[in-house]
């Protein structure tokens, strides 16, 4: 089950985003809009798969090894936020 995030930026209504993480395989999935059946996928970079619906529209992306790739960046952001809170 993914977490749903509503996005509203500068008065524009953007599609709802569903983010889910599968810790057993370290995969982060991000899907925009209503859930649709994925018909095709293409690895566009190592560990990054673009997923398309039957019309060929991009509907989601999957990032393999997400924890390994994103953890250093998230740790740095969290550390910076913590430092700012103690100032």
Image (cartoon, grey):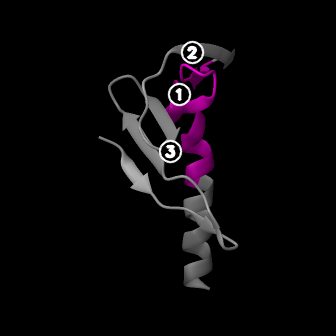
Looking at the rendered image, the disc whose residue lies closer to the viewer, 3 or 1, is 3
Q: Element type at marker 3?
A: loop
Q: Which residues are magenta?
A: 47-75
Q: CA distance from mark 3 to mark 1?
A: 15 Å
* Tag shown at residue 62: 1
Mark 1 and mark 2 residues within 8 Å of each other at the beta carbon? yes
Vertical position of residue 64 compared to residue 73: above or below = above
| Residue 74 located within the stretch drawn in magenta | yes
Quote the CA–CA distance across marks 2 and 3.
17 Å
Q: Nearer the viewer, mark 1 or mark 2?
A: 2
Q: Please tell me whether mark 2 or mark 3 is closer to you in this view.
A: 3
Q: Residue at x 38, y 22 (%)?
A: 25
Can you give x and y, in whole percent of width and height, for residue 14 in the image?
60, 57
Q: Secondary structure at mark 2?
A: strand
Mark 3 / mark 1, whichever is N-terminal: 3
- Residue under circle 2? 41
Can you name the residue that lies furthest to the left here? 1
Mark number, residue 19: none
Distance from disc 1 to disc 2, alpha carbons, whole Å, reads 10 Å
Quarter of the rendering occupied by the C terminus = bottom right
Q: State which tag comes first along the sequence, 1 or 2.
A: 2
The answer to which of 37 and 86 lies nearer the viewer is 37
Q: Where 6 sits versus 32, above or below?
A: below
In the image, is 18 to the left or to the right of 10?
Answer: left
The secondary element bearing badge 1 is classed as strand
């Amino acid at each position: 089950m993914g977490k749903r995030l509503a996005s509203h930026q500068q008065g524009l209504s953007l599609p709802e985003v569903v983010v889910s993480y599968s810790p057993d395989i370290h995969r982060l999935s991000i899907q925009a809009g209503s859930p649709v059946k994925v018909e095709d996928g293409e690895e566009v970079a190592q560990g990054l798969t673009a997923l398309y619906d039957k019309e060929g529209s991009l509907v989601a992306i999957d990032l393999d090894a997400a924890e390994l790739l994103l953890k250093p960046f998230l740790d740095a952001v969290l550390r910076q936020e913590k430092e700012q809170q103690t100032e």
